[in-house]
Image (tube, helix red, strand yellow):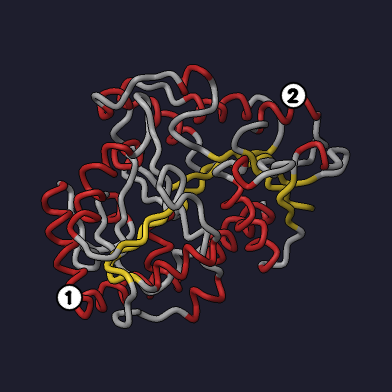
Amino acid sequence: MNIYLVGYIPKYFFSSKHTNFWPWSYLAETFRLLGYNAYHINVNKIDHKKPCLYICWNNPDTIELINKYKPHKDSIMIQKLTSFDASPESRNREWTSDPVNFFKGWHWPQYQKLDLLNATGYRFYAFGARTDTESFPEKKKITDKYKDRIFWIPWGTMTVSHDDIMKSNPIISNFRYDLAFVGSRWGSLYRGNISEWDTYLQPLIDATGKSYIAGRGTRKGPVSVSEHVEALKLAALCPIIHATSWKVEKGIMDRFWTVFSLGRFGVTDNEGILSFYDEKEVVLALTPEEYIDKSLYYMKNPAMQKPYIEYALRLIREKYNQYEVWKTILSKIFSE
């Protein structure tokens, strides 16, 4: 049975690539390493008359795919779960002024698609970054109902290859930059990381000598994966900041996993990391003041980073990498 990670392959330009292009491509390569026939492909290129396994987020999501393309009845659907879907309702919500209470009252439309999938007759599953499922009533209700259908994964790294993860070692010297950060500065009234950028990251940039800052919304702009990786390896500090929605849900973004997969270090601003590591194994700071103080200390004392890099790398190699995560998930799916 072929595995299709559906969508996000643009016709022309780098600038038009959707965020999901990168993890979809990484996962397709990971599945091939595991011995599966896996393809990152647009939906109109698939032969839907044959049974296959579809992995979707949006355009189409699994429900849209079923309704429009009528896949073979023995196909399997996997829906990516996020706090918002792509509907106008999700895009136009003002939630940043009081995100905790917003999410407590939110009805989680992407999660509700599991009820629709359940009614289709297709075998289905879902996956998403491991997050807090207890604090938000509607989210808890849905995840409890489908707990045997949902796989919670560490969301990263989707940048560093499995082979490079296995070869990686702590880097604590010979730096070119004081600080390196590769990621978009993005947002509006409704969502984004503008607040975190301005209160956690920008003061660090202002306090350091030589920084490498790249990504959409920055002066340098987007860079290649190889440039991204090289910059992080050459920086004494690689800050790890999260958009507000990720912090509210206690989800850990790709940046943490990529930084430590490369043998590098950053202070983490999200207590969701304690779902993966003991509090003595990471450096956590939950206020801008504490984050800046700790970051500057470890930037100036890179030898003190080493035990934290070793802790993180050990578990990334053993279980927090996509090869090990999806080996377990796909084995379970195809054995049922």
User: Which residue is labeled 1 in the image?
Assistant: 301
Q: Is residue 298 above or below residue 154?
A: below
Residue 40 position, x and y percent, is 71, 50
Residue 66 position, x and y percent, is 74, 29
Q: Taking the image as drawn, is residue 145 in sight?
A: yes
- What amino acid does circle 1 point to? Asn
Q: Residues within 10 Å of mark 1 (few under 14, many from 20)?
A: few
Q: Is residue 209 left or right of residue 67?
A: left
User: Which residue is labeled 2 in the image?
Assistant: 67
Residue 47 position, x and y percent, is 86, 42
- Residue at image coords 49%, 73%: 165
- Residue at image coords 15%, 46%: 287
Give the secondary structure at mark 2.
helix
Q: Is residue 6 above or below residue 291?
A: above
Q: Residues within 10 Å of mark 2 (few under 14, many from 20)?
A: few
Separation of residues labelled 1 and 2 (CA atoms): 57 Å
Q: Nearer the viewer, residue 116 or 42?
A: 42
Q: Nearer the viewer, residue 220 or 190?
A: 220
Give the secondary structure at mark 1.
loop
Q: Taking the image as drawn, is residue 132 in sight?
A: no
- What amino acid does circle 2 point to? Asn
- Residue at image coords 25%, 55%: 205
